[in-house]
Image: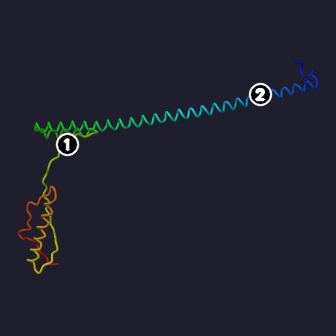
């Protein structure tokens, strides 16, 4: 093509029309490419989102399995410690090493996360009780008599309780302190 300065107005107009057409085609092409890239980007985003969501779900399932496995292992560990302790306790009792066992386990349990079983003992504890009851009677002898009836009823109720016994009650000898109210 000849330089523009050597061209006629018609040629310049034709060149301008051609350039304008070419630019429009380029813009249309670029718009099409941009639309295609935009669609590809959206597809990639959707694919990535699906992949990320899938990975997240897999991680959650793994974490749940690991958590359940860890809880099960902790429970099994605690059960194993209890079985070991029970076997040690039975052996200590069979060999009459109870005092040594108590000292050993007490010192060891301070250092353990899961304690070994300790020995418990039965104790009889005497609890002195003073009971004041209000009875209605004609005189002090009648009041003592009514109080003895209440004491017998109370003793029967206490005897019904598990692990409680009434070994001696001073109520039956009539040794009541009686005060008129």
Front position among marks 1 and 2: 2
| Residue 175 percent coordinates (x, y) | 7, 70
| Residue 152 percent coordinates (x, y) | 11, 67
Q: Quadrant of the C terminus?
A: bottom left
For the point 34% across and 38% down, the residue is: 71
Horizontal relation, residue 82 to residue 12: left or right:
left
Tell me the distance, in whole angstroms, between the alpha carbons under discs 1 and 2: 89 Å
The residue tagged 2 is: 26
For the point 28% across and 36% down, the residue is: 77
Q: Quadrant of the N terminus?
A: top right
For the point 12% across and 39% down, the residue is: 93
Viewer-proximal residue among 57 and 114: 57
- Near mark 1 (Cα within 10 A), the count class, few <14, some 14-19 or many ≥20, is some
Relative to 124, does residue 26 appear above or below in the rendering?
above
| Residue 2 percent coordinates (x, y) | 89, 18
| Residue 128 percent coordinates (x, y) | 13, 62
- Near mark 2 (Cα within 10 A), the count class, few <14, some 14-19 or many ≥20, is few
Viewer-proximal residue among 119 and 37: 37
Dot 1 and dot 2 residues touching (CB under 8 Å): no
Residue furthest right in the image: 8
Q: Secondary structure at mark 1?
A: loop
Horizontal relation, residue 77 to residue 24: left or right:
left
The residue tagged 1 is: 118
């Amino acid at each position: 093509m000849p330089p523009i300065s050597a061209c006629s107005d018609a040629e310049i107009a034709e060149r301008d029309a051609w350039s304008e057409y070419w630019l429009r085609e380029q813009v249309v092409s670029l718009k099409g490419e941009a639309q295609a890239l935009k669609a590809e980007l959206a597809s990639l985003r959707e694919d990535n989102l699906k992949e990320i969501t899938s990975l997240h779900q897999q991680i959650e399932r793994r974490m749940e399995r690991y958590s359940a496995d860890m809880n099960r292992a902790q429970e099994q560990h605690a059960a194993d410690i209890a079985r070991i302790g029970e076997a040690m306790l039975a052996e200590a009792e069979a060999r009459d090493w109870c005092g040594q066992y108590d000292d050993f386990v007490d010192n060891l349990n301070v250092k353990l996360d899961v304690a070994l079983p300790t020995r418990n003992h039965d104790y009889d504890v005497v609890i002195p009780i003073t009971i004041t009851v209000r009875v209605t009677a004609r005189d002090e002898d009648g009041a003592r008599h009514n109080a003895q009836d209440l004491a017998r009823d109370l003793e029967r109720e206490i005897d019904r309780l598990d692990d409680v016994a009434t070994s001696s009650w001073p109520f039956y000898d009539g040794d009541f302190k009686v005060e008129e109210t």
